[in-house]
Amino acid sequence: MAKTDAWGAPGGRAFARREARSGGPAGNARLIAEPAYQRLLAAEPLLRRSIPALIIIFLIVIAALRFLSLVNDRDEVERDAKSVLALAAGQMAQAITADPNAAGVNATDLLEKTSRQGAMGRSHVLAITDGAFKIVAVSPLSTGWQGRSLDSLVLGGQPLFMFGDRAGVMDVSIGGKDWFAAVSLTGDRKNAAAMLVPKEAVFDSWRKTVSLNVTLFVLTAGVLIVILYAYFGQAARAQAADRIYLEAHQRIDMALVRGRCGLWDWDMVRGKMYWSRSMYDMLGYEPCDTMLSFGEVDEIIHPDDGDLFELANRIVEREIDHIDQVFRMRHADGQWVWMRARAQVIDPEAPEIQLIGIAVDVTEQRHLALRSEAADMRLRTAIENINESFVLWDAAERLIMCNSKFQQDNGLSDRDVMPGATRDMLEERMLAFASERRLANANGPHGGVTLE
Protein backbone atom coordinates (compact mmCIF):
# COMPACT_ATOMS: atom_id res chain seq x y z
CA MET A 1 0.00 0.00 0.00
CA ALA A 2 1.57 3.24 -1.12
CA LYS A 3 0.42 5.23 1.88
CA THR A 4 2.32 3.07 4.37
CA ASP A 5 5.46 4.88 3.28
CA ALA A 6 3.75 8.19 3.70
CA TRP A 7 2.35 7.65 7.14
CA GLY A 8 5.52 6.46 8.70
CA ALA A 9 4.78 2.81 8.97
CA PRO A 10 7.58 1.30 6.95
CA GLY A 11 8.64 4.20 4.91
CA GLY A 12 8.76 7.51 6.74
CA ARG A 13 6.57 10.55 7.10
CA ALA A 14 4.80 11.33 3.89
CA PHE A 15 3.13 14.58 4.72
CA ALA A 16 6.43 16.40 5.15
CA ARG A 17 7.88 14.64 2.13
CA ARG A 18 4.90 15.56 0.01
CA GLU A 19 5.32 19.22 1.03
CA ALA A 20 8.99 19.07 0.13
CA ARG A 21 8.32 17.42 -3.24
CA SER A 22 5.69 19.95 -4.19
CA GLY A 23 8.01 22.88 -3.54
CA GLY A 24 4.92 25.05 -3.34
CA PRO A 25 4.73 28.45 -1.73
CA ALA A 26 3.00 27.00 1.33
CA GLY A 27 6.01 24.91 2.26
CA ASN A 28 8.53 27.68 1.50
CA ALA A 29 6.48 30.31 3.29
CA ARG A 30 6.23 28.06 6.31
CA LEU A 31 10.01 27.57 6.37
CA ILE A 32 10.55 31.31 6.14
CA ALA A 33 7.83 32.43 8.53
CA GLU A 34 8.19 29.77 11.21
CA PRO A 35 11.47 31.07 12.78
CA ALA A 36 10.20 34.64 12.82
CA TYR A 37 6.93 33.52 14.37
CA GLN A 38 8.74 31.55 17.06
CA ARG A 39 10.93 34.55 17.85
CA LEU A 40 7.81 36.71 18.07
CA LEU A 41 6.25 34.29 20.53
CA ALA A 42 9.42 34.31 22.64
CA ALA A 43 9.54 38.12 22.63
CA GLU A 44 5.83 38.57 23.33
CA PRO A 45 6.14 38.83 27.16
CA LEU A 46 8.87 41.45 26.79
CA LEU A 47 6.82 43.40 24.27
CA ARG A 48 3.78 43.27 26.55
CA ARG A 49 5.77 44.64 29.49
CA SER A 50 7.34 47.36 27.34
CA ILE A 51 4.01 48.77 26.14
CA PRO A 52 3.42 51.02 29.21
CA ALA A 53 6.97 52.38 28.98
CA LEU A 54 6.57 53.01 25.25
CA ILE A 55 3.31 54.87 25.82
CA ILE A 56 4.86 57.02 28.56
CA ILE A 57 7.87 57.78 26.35
CA PHE A 58 5.52 58.63 23.50
CA LEU A 59 3.55 61.04 25.68
CA ILE A 60 6.75 62.66 27.01
CA VAL A 61 8.12 63.11 23.49
CA ILE A 62 4.84 64.58 22.25
CA ALA A 63 4.64 66.91 25.26
CA ALA A 64 8.26 68.05 24.85
CA LEU A 65 7.88 68.71 21.13
CA ARG A 66 4.65 70.60 21.62
CA PHE A 67 6.13 72.59 24.50
CA LEU A 68 9.08 73.67 22.35
CA SER A 69 6.70 74.54 19.53
CA LEU A 70 4.54 76.68 21.83
CA VAL A 71 7.59 78.46 23.25
CA ASN A 72 8.73 79.20 19.71
CA ASP A 73 5.25 80.48 18.83
CA ARG A 74 5.31 82.78 21.85
CA ASP A 75 8.66 84.22 20.82
CA GLU A 76 7.32 84.84 17.31
CA VAL A 77 4.20 86.56 18.68
CA GLU A 78 6.35 88.78 20.88
CA ARG A 79 8.72 89.64 18.02
CA ASP A 80 5.82 90.51 15.71
CA ALA A 81 4.17 92.69 18.34
CA LYS A 82 7.39 94.60 19.05
CA SER A 83 8.05 95.05 15.34
CA VAL A 84 4.59 96.52 14.84
CA LEU A 85 5.06 98.93 17.78
CA ALA A 86 8.49 100.12 16.64
CA LEU A 87 7.38 100.56 13.03
CA ALA A 88 4.19 102.45 13.92
CA ALA A 89 5.99 104.77 16.37
CA GLY A 90 8.67 105.56 13.79
CA GLN A 91 6.10 106.27 11.07
CA MET A 92 4.19 108.69 13.31
CA ALA A 93 7.41 110.47 14.30
CA GLN A 94 8.36 110.87 10.62
CA ALA A 95 4.88 112.20 9.80
CA ILE A 96 5.17 114.77 12.62
CA THR A 97 8.62 115.83 11.41
CA ALA A 98 7.36 116.27 7.87
CA ASP A 99 4.19 118.14 8.94
CA PRO A 100 4.37 120.11 12.21
CA ASN A 101 0.56 120.36 12.18
CA ALA A 102 0.41 116.56 12.59
CA ALA A 103 1.18 117.09 16.26
CA GLY A 104 -1.42 119.82 16.51
CA VAL A 105 -4.65 120.23 14.67
CA ASN A 106 -4.07 117.13 12.53
CA ALA A 107 -3.04 114.84 15.43
CA THR A 108 -6.39 113.08 15.53
CA ASP A 109 -6.27 112.35 11.79
CA LEU A 110 -2.75 110.94 12.14
CA LEU A 111 -3.79 108.67 14.99
CA GLU A 112 -6.85 107.41 13.12
CA LYS A 113 -4.82 106.77 9.99
CA THR A 114 -2.21 104.81 11.91
CA SER A 115 -4.76 102.83 13.92
CA ARG A 116 -6.46 101.67 10.71
CA GLN A 117 -3.39 99.68 9.71
CA GLY A 118 -4.00 95.94 9.55
CA ALA A 119 -1.55 95.04 12.32
CA MET A 120 -3.25 97.28 14.85
CA GLY A 121 -5.86 96.02 17.24
CA ARG A 122 -8.33 97.53 19.65
CA SER A 123 -5.89 97.05 22.52
CA HIS A 124 -3.14 99.21 20.94
CA VAL A 125 -2.73 102.71 22.36
CA LEU A 126 -1.26 105.48 20.16
CA ALA A 127 -0.15 108.75 21.73
CA ILE A 128 1.50 112.01 20.56
CA THR A 129 3.33 114.10 23.14
CA ASP A 130 5.11 117.42 23.25
CA GLY A 131 8.75 117.89 24.21
CA ALA A 132 7.94 117.40 27.92
CA PHE A 133 6.14 114.12 27.10
CA LYS A 134 2.76 115.61 27.89
CA ILE A 135 0.13 113.76 25.89
CA VAL A 136 -1.54 116.07 23.37
CA ALA A 137 -3.46 113.36 21.46
CA VAL A 138 -4.26 109.77 22.25
CA SER A 139 -6.28 106.96 20.66
CA PRO A 140 -8.47 105.53 21.91
CA LEU A 141 -9.80 108.33 24.03
CA SER A 142 -11.22 105.88 26.52
CA THR A 143 -7.81 105.55 28.13
CA GLY A 144 -8.26 108.98 29.78
CA TRP A 145 -4.57 109.79 29.19
CA GLN A 146 -5.24 113.08 27.40
CA GLY A 147 -3.22 115.91 29.00
CA ARG A 148 -1.26 113.60 31.34
CA SER A 149 2.49 113.13 31.38
CA LEU A 150 3.49 109.91 29.59
CA ASP A 151 6.67 109.44 31.59
CA SER A 152 4.64 109.53 34.79
CA LEU A 153 2.25 106.86 33.52
CA VAL A 154 4.93 104.50 32.30
CA LEU A 155 7.10 102.85 34.92
CA GLY A 156 10.42 101.32 33.95
CA GLY A 157 10.61 103.06 30.59
CA GLN A 158 13.13 105.86 31.23
CA PRO A 159 15.45 104.73 28.37
CA LEU A 160 12.56 105.25 25.99
CA PHE A 161 12.25 108.93 26.88
CA MET A 162 16.01 109.44 26.77
CA PHE A 163 16.98 107.54 23.62
CA GLY A 164 13.72 107.09 21.72
CA ASP A 165 14.11 104.64 18.81
CA ARG A 166 17.52 103.48 20.00
CA ALA A 167 15.98 102.06 23.20
CA GLY A 168 13.82 99.77 21.08
CA VAL A 169 10.63 98.21 22.46
CA MET A 170 10.68 97.77 26.21
CA ASP A 171 8.67 95.94 28.85
CA VAL A 172 7.02 98.53 31.03
CA SER A 173 4.34 98.67 33.71
CA ILE A 174 1.22 100.83 33.51
CA GLY A 175 -1.35 100.72 36.23
CA GLY A 176 0.19 97.56 37.66
CA LYS A 177 -0.06 95.67 34.35
CA ASP A 178 2.70 94.68 31.94
CA TRP A 179 2.87 96.46 28.61
CA PHE A 180 5.08 96.68 25.56
CA ALA A 181 6.02 100.27 24.71
CA ALA A 182 7.91 102.02 21.91
CA VAL A 183 8.69 105.76 21.75
CA SER A 184 10.08 107.59 18.76
CA LEU A 185 11.37 111.21 19.09
CA THR A 186 11.21 113.79 16.34
CA GLY A 187 14.44 115.27 15.07
CA ASP A 188 14.04 118.50 17.03
CA ARG A 189 12.83 116.55 20.13
CA LYS A 190 9.81 118.87 20.33
CA ASN A 191 7.38 115.98 19.92
CA ALA A 192 7.29 112.22 20.44
CA ALA A 193 5.13 109.38 19.14
CA ALA A 194 4.39 106.43 21.44
CA MET A 195 2.90 103.01 20.72
CA LEU A 196 1.79 100.80 23.62
CA VAL A 197 -0.04 97.48 23.94
CA PRO A 198 -0.82 95.28 26.98
CA LYS A 199 1.01 91.98 27.08
CA GLU A 200 -2.23 90.29 27.99
CA ALA A 201 -3.74 91.35 24.66
CA VAL A 202 -0.62 90.31 22.72
CA PHE A 203 -0.56 86.77 24.13
CA ASP A 204 -4.32 86.26 24.35
CA SER A 205 -4.49 84.15 21.16
CA TRP A 206 -1.35 82.25 22.16
CA ARG A 207 -2.82 81.39 25.55
CA LYS A 208 -5.91 79.99 23.84
CA THR A 209 -3.67 77.84 21.68
CA VAL A 210 -1.82 76.64 24.79
CA SER A 211 -5.10 75.83 26.49
CA LEU A 212 -6.31 73.91 23.44
CA ASN A 213 -3.06 71.95 23.19
CA VAL A 214 -3.09 71.09 26.88
CA THR A 215 -6.68 69.91 26.61
CA LEU A 216 -5.91 67.78 23.58
CA PHE A 217 -2.83 66.33 25.27
CA VAL A 218 -4.77 65.45 28.42
CA LEU A 219 -7.52 63.85 26.35
CA THR A 220 -4.98 61.94 24.26
CA ALA A 221 -3.18 60.74 27.37
CA GLY A 222 -6.49 59.75 28.93
CA VAL A 223 -7.53 57.81 25.84
CA LEU A 224 -4.16 56.04 25.71
CA ILE A 225 -4.40 55.15 29.39
CA VAL A 226 -7.91 53.77 28.86
CA ILE A 227 -6.69 51.81 25.83
CA LEU A 228 -3.72 50.55 27.85
CA TYR A 229 -6.03 49.46 30.66
CA ALA A 230 -8.37 47.78 28.19
CA TYR A 231 -5.41 46.09 26.47
CA PHE A 232 -4.06 44.62 29.68
CA GLY A 233 -7.55 43.62 30.75
CA GLN A 234 -8.13 41.95 27.41
CA ALA A 235 -4.69 40.33 27.55
CA ALA A 236 -5.44 38.97 31.02
CA ARG A 237 -8.79 37.63 29.86
CA ALA A 238 -7.17 36.14 26.75
CA GLN A 239 -4.54 34.41 28.90
CA ALA A 240 -7.24 33.06 31.18
CA ALA A 241 -9.26 31.90 28.16
CA ASP A 242 -6.17 30.28 26.65
CA ARG A 243 -5.45 28.52 29.92
CA ILE A 244 -9.04 27.30 30.20
CA TYR A 245 -8.99 26.20 26.57
CA LEU A 246 -5.70 24.38 27.02
CA GLU A 247 -6.92 22.62 30.14
CA ALA A 248 -10.21 21.68 28.49
CA HIS A 249 -8.36 20.50 25.39
CA GLN A 250 -6.04 18.36 27.50
CA ARG A 251 -8.98 16.87 29.40
CA ILE A 252 -10.80 16.11 26.15
CA ASP A 253 -7.67 14.54 24.68
CA MET A 254 -7.17 12.45 27.80
CA ALA A 255 -10.81 11.34 27.76
CA LEU A 256 -10.57 10.47 24.07
CA VAL A 257 -7.35 8.53 24.57
CA ARG A 258 -8.78 6.61 27.53
CA GLY A 259 -11.96 5.90 25.60
CA ARG A 260 -10.04 4.73 22.50
CA CYS A 261 -11.78 7.22 20.28
CA GLY A 262 -10.72 10.20 18.23
CA LEU A 263 -12.26 13.48 17.11
CA TRP A 264 -12.15 14.51 13.47
CA ASP A 265 -13.41 17.45 11.48
CA TRP A 266 -13.86 17.08 7.73
CA ASP A 267 -13.92 20.19 5.51
CA MET A 268 -15.59 18.87 2.36
CA VAL A 269 -15.01 22.00 0.27
CA ARG A 270 -11.26 22.16 0.80
CA GLY A 271 -10.76 18.43 1.06
CA LYS A 272 -8.98 18.70 4.39
CA MET A 273 -9.47 16.77 7.58
CA TYR A 274 -8.45 17.58 11.15
CA TRP A 275 -7.58 14.76 13.55
CA SER A 276 -7.31 15.01 17.30
CA ARG A 277 -4.14 13.75 18.96
CA SER A 278 -6.01 10.67 20.20
CA MET A 279 -6.75 9.72 16.59
CA TYR A 280 -3.04 9.59 15.82
CA ASP A 281 -2.42 7.63 19.02
CA MET A 282 -4.99 4.98 18.08
CA LEU A 283 -3.34 4.44 14.71
CA GLY A 284 0.22 4.80 15.97
CA TYR A 285 1.18 7.75 13.73
CA GLU A 286 3.21 10.79 14.66
CA PRO A 287 0.85 13.68 15.52
CA CYS A 288 1.10 16.75 13.30
CA ASP A 289 -0.44 20.21 13.52
CA THR A 290 -1.31 20.42 9.84
CA MET A 291 -4.60 19.24 8.40
CA LEU A 292 -4.62 16.00 6.42
CA SER A 293 -5.61 15.79 2.80
CA PHE A 294 -8.51 13.75 1.54
CA GLY A 295 -6.27 11.33 -0.31
CA GLU A 296 -4.01 10.70 2.66
CA VAL A 297 -6.91 9.48 4.77
CA ASP A 298 -8.45 7.46 1.94
CA GLU A 299 -5.24 5.53 1.29
CA ILE A 300 -5.09 4.02 4.80
CA ILE A 301 -8.71 2.80 4.67
CA HIS A 302 -9.15 -0.85 3.68
CA PRO A 303 -10.32 -1.03 0.04
CA ASP A 304 -12.94 -3.70 0.88
CA ASP A 305 -14.69 -1.48 3.45
CA GLY A 306 -16.07 1.20 1.17
CA ASP A 307 -14.92 4.09 -0.96
CA LEU A 308 -14.36 7.40 0.83
CA PHE A 309 -14.68 9.31 -2.44
CA GLU A 310 -18.10 7.83 -3.09
CA LEU A 311 -19.19 8.69 0.44
CA ALA A 312 -17.95 12.27 -0.02
CA ASN A 313 -19.87 12.60 -3.29
CA ARG A 314 -23.09 11.48 -1.62
CA ILE A 315 -22.61 14.07 1.11
CA VAL A 316 -21.80 16.84 -1.37
CA GLU A 317 -24.87 15.97 -3.43
CA ARG A 318 -26.96 16.26 -0.22
CA GLU A 319 -28.07 12.63 -0.41
CA ILE A 320 -27.04 12.03 3.20
CA ASP A 321 -26.18 14.36 6.05
CA HIS A 322 -24.61 11.91 8.50
CA ILE A 323 -22.19 8.97 8.65
CA ASP A 324 -22.34 5.80 10.75
CA GLN A 325 -19.96 3.26 9.28
CA VAL A 326 -17.53 0.56 10.40
CA PHE A 327 -14.32 0.14 8.42
CA ARG A 328 -10.69 -0.81 8.80
CA MET A 329 -7.75 1.58 8.87
CA ARG A 330 -4.09 0.66 8.62
CA HIS A 331 -2.09 0.98 11.82
CA ALA A 332 1.46 2.31 11.73
CA ASP A 333 2.75 -1.24 12.34
CA GLY A 334 0.84 -2.55 9.32
CA GLN A 335 -2.10 -4.14 11.14
CA TRP A 336 -5.72 -3.30 10.44
CA VAL A 337 -7.72 -1.49 13.11
CA TRP A 338 -11.51 -1.67 13.08
CA MET A 339 -13.01 1.82 13.47
CA ARG A 340 -16.59 2.98 13.79
CA ALA A 341 -17.01 6.51 12.50
CA ARG A 342 -20.07 8.57 13.33
CA ALA A 343 -20.41 12.14 12.07
CA GLN A 344 -23.02 14.75 11.28
CA VAL A 345 -23.08 17.68 8.86
CA ILE A 346 -22.89 20.82 11.01
CA ASP A 347 -25.28 22.89 8.89
CA PRO A 348 -27.01 21.09 6.01
CA GLU A 349 -28.15 24.44 4.54
CA ALA A 350 -24.68 26.02 4.52
CA PRO A 351 -22.93 26.35 1.15
CA GLU A 352 -19.71 24.93 2.62
CA ILE A 353 -20.27 21.40 3.92
CA GLN A 354 -18.41 20.44 7.06
CA LEU A 355 -18.70 17.24 9.05
CA ILE A 356 -17.64 16.72 12.62
CA GLY A 357 -17.73 13.47 14.53
CA ILE A 358 -15.80 10.77 16.34
CA ALA A 359 -14.14 7.50 15.42
CA VAL A 360 -14.11 4.70 17.99
CA ASP A 361 -11.71 1.77 18.02
CA VAL A 362 -13.99 -1.29 17.92
CA THR A 363 -11.28 -3.84 17.16
CA GLU A 364 -11.76 -5.71 20.45
CA GLN A 365 -15.53 -5.75 20.11
CA ARG A 366 -15.15 -6.97 16.52
CA HIS A 367 -12.84 -9.76 17.56
CA LEU A 368 -15.17 -10.71 20.43
CA ALA A 369 -18.11 -10.82 18.05
CA LEU A 370 -16.17 -13.03 15.65
CA ARG A 371 -15.09 -15.36 18.46
CA SER A 372 -18.66 -15.48 19.78
CA GLU A 373 -19.92 -16.28 16.31
CA ALA A 374 -17.35 -19.05 15.94
CA ALA A 375 -18.21 -20.47 19.35
CA ASP A 376 -21.90 -20.38 18.51
CA MET A 377 -21.21 -22.15 15.26
CA ARG A 378 -19.23 -24.87 17.02
CA LEU A 379 -22.01 -25.29 19.58
CA ARG A 380 -24.62 -25.61 16.89
CA THR A 381 -22.47 -28.14 15.06
CA ALA A 382 -22.03 -30.19 18.21
CA ILE A 383 -25.77 -30.15 18.98
CA GLU A 384 -26.59 -31.08 15.43
CA ASN A 385 -24.31 -34.10 15.65
CA ILE A 386 -26.13 -35.48 18.74
CA ASN A 387 -27.98 -38.70 17.91
CA GLU A 388 -30.84 -37.80 20.20
CA SER A 389 -33.45 -35.12 19.87
CA PHE A 390 -32.27 -31.84 21.50
CA VAL A 391 -34.16 -28.64 22.24
CA LEU A 392 -33.25 -25.60 24.39
CA TRP A 393 -35.89 -23.31 25.93
CA ASP A 394 -35.36 -20.07 27.84
CA ALA A 395 -36.94 -19.17 31.19
CA ALA A 396 -40.08 -17.91 29.43
CA GLU A 397 -40.55 -21.18 27.55
CA ARG A 398 -39.43 -19.70 24.25
CA LEU A 399 -37.34 -21.66 21.81
CA ILE A 400 -33.62 -20.91 21.73
CA MET A 401 -32.35 -23.70 19.48
CA CYS A 402 -32.95 -27.31 18.54
CA ASN A 403 -31.32 -29.90 16.34
CA SER A 404 -32.68 -31.41 13.18
CA LYS A 405 -33.35 -34.69 15.04
CA PHE A 406 -35.86 -32.86 17.27
CA GLN A 407 -37.41 -31.26 14.21
CA GLN A 408 -37.74 -34.59 12.37
CA ASP A 409 -39.06 -36.54 15.34
CA ASN A 410 -41.81 -34.00 15.97
CA GLY A 411 -42.66 -33.26 12.38
CA LEU A 412 -41.85 -29.56 12.56
CA SER A 413 -40.96 -27.37 9.60
CA ASP A 414 -38.12 -24.83 9.46
CA ARG A 415 -40.64 -22.03 9.97
CA ASP A 416 -41.94 -23.69 13.12
CA VAL A 417 -38.56 -23.85 14.85
CA MET A 418 -37.60 -20.22 14.43
CA PRO A 419 -35.90 -18.90 17.64
CA GLY A 420 -38.45 -17.22 19.91
CA ALA A 421 -41.34 -19.54 19.16
CA THR A 422 -43.33 -20.44 22.28
CA ARG A 423 -43.41 -23.97 23.59
CA ASP A 424 -47.18 -24.15 23.64
CA MET A 425 -47.35 -23.27 19.96
CA LEU A 426 -44.78 -25.92 19.05
CA GLU A 427 -46.47 -28.59 21.15
CA GLU A 428 -49.70 -27.97 19.26
CA ARG A 429 -47.90 -28.63 15.98
CA MET A 430 -45.54 -31.43 16.98
CA LEU A 431 -46.24 -35.18 17.01
CA ALA A 432 -46.60 -37.02 20.31
CA PHE A 433 -43.22 -37.81 21.78
CA ALA A 434 -42.22 -41.04 23.52
CA SER A 435 -40.29 -39.63 26.47
CA GLU A 436 -38.89 -36.42 27.93
CA ARG A 437 -35.93 -35.88 30.20
CA ARG A 438 -35.25 -32.50 31.77
CA LEU A 439 -31.82 -31.26 32.81
CA ALA A 440 -31.51 -29.09 35.91
CA ASN A 441 -31.22 -25.36 35.20
CA ALA A 442 -30.60 -22.46 37.58
CA ASN A 443 -33.03 -20.28 35.62
CA GLY A 444 -36.07 -21.94 37.16
CA PRO A 445 -38.34 -24.94 36.77
CA HIS A 446 -39.37 -24.01 33.24
CA GLY A 447 -35.90 -23.45 31.89
CA GLY A 448 -33.36 -25.99 30.94
CA VAL A 449 -32.48 -28.53 28.32
CA THR A 450 -35.01 -31.11 27.23
CA LEU A 451 -33.89 -34.36 25.65
CA GLU A 452 -36.55 -36.33 23.84
Image (cartoon, rainbow, N blue to C red):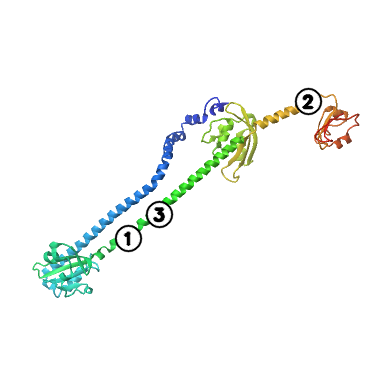
Residue depicted at x 37% and y 54%: 221
* Residue farthest to the left, as pictured: 188
Q: Which one is in front, 348 or 159?
A: 159
Q: Which residue is mark 2?
A: 381
Taking the image as drawn, is residue 414 in sight? Answer: no
Image vertical order of residue 118 relative to residue 329, above or below? below
Quadrant of the rendered image containing residue 259: top right
Pointer 1: residues within 10 angstroms few (<14), some, or many (20+)?
few
User: Mark 1 or mark 3, which has the lower sequence index?
Assistant: 1
Pointer 3: residues within 10 angstroms few (<14), some, or many (20+)?
few
Quadrant of the rendered image containing residue 49: top left
Amino acid type at image mark 2? Thr
Left or right of residue 65, residue 290 in this image: right
Amino acid type at image mark 3? Val
Amino acid type at image mark 1? Ser
Q: Could you tell me if the residues under marks 2 and 1 are in contact, i.e. CB atoms within 8 Å? A: no
Provide residue 91's location: percent of width, then percent of height.
15, 66
SS for callout 1 = helix
Provide residue 263's location: percent of width, then percent of height.
58, 38
Inter-mark Cα distance, 2 to 3? 88 Å
SS for callout 3 = helix
